[in-house]
Image (spheres, rainbow, N blue to C red):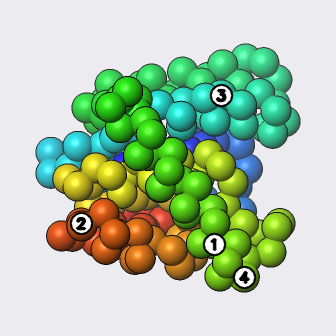
Amino acid sequence: MYVDTSALIDCAKFVSGIKLKKDYRDLAENNLKAFRRLCDKYQFVIPYIVIGEYAYVIQNKIHADENLKIKILNWLWKFVQDNGAIIVPITDSDLADTLETANEILRKEKENGYYFNRSLDATDSIILAQALHDFDSKILLTTDSRMQEATSILDIEKKLGRQNSLTIVDDLSKI
């Protein structure tokens, strides 16, 4: 199961006491409980690019003192340790294919009429592409509605020859 930055940030904010909108607070609480319940059934995979995006968001988009930001950064390491998660880079042999798929996702989303401010960004498309290229992955956890609404995924799954669809969810309590 791949885990996106948005879900991790929401969980870290919840644990750190940063105020979240009710919907995101409920999702974070549900997902934290579900991580513990599901860690024996699923291998949680954090794409390496998520680590960079996580640090960027904490530094540039979370308004908190430096001690709280450090606490949020450290929460990710605790999450990895407590849940047996793995951090996975894109290997050299997969890099070209993954980036080609990421560009195809961006291109198809633009063709499908996404407006610029609602379109996926490059990081999102790389995370999606990496999960799609991992044929063992069945689930991508994200609270990012742009990733949840991506319409290009089914076409790309067929092109890649995936036997099982990648299910994109925001709430692990439904699994």
Inter-mark Cα distance, 1 to 4: 7 Å
Inter-mark Cα distance, 3 to 2: 32 Å
Of the two numbered discs 2 and 4 on the same chain, state the one appearing first in sequence: 4
Of the two numbered discs 3 and 2 on the same chain, state the one appearing first in sequence: 3
* Residue at the limit of the structure toward the left, as seen here: 41
Question: Tag 4, which secondary structure?
Answer: loop
Q: Does residue 70 appear anywhere in the picture?
A: yes
Of the two numbered discs 4 and 3 on the same chain, state the one appearing first in sequence: 3
- The residue pinned by badge 2 equals 162
Which residue is depicted at the point 41% across and 76% down?
A: 155
- The residue pinned by badge 3 equals 55
Inter-mark Cα distance, 3 to 1: 27 Å
- The residue pinned by badge 1 equals 109
Q: Is residue 69 above or below residue 96?
A: above
* Residue at the limit of the structure toward the bottom, as seen here: 113
Identify the disc placed on residue 113: 4
Question: Tag 1, which secondary structure?
Answer: helix
Question: Tag 3, which secondary structure?
Answer: helix
Callout 3: 10 Å neighbours few (<14), some, many (20+)? some
Q: Is residue 153 left or right of residue 132?
A: right
Question: Tag 2, which secondary structure?
Answer: loop
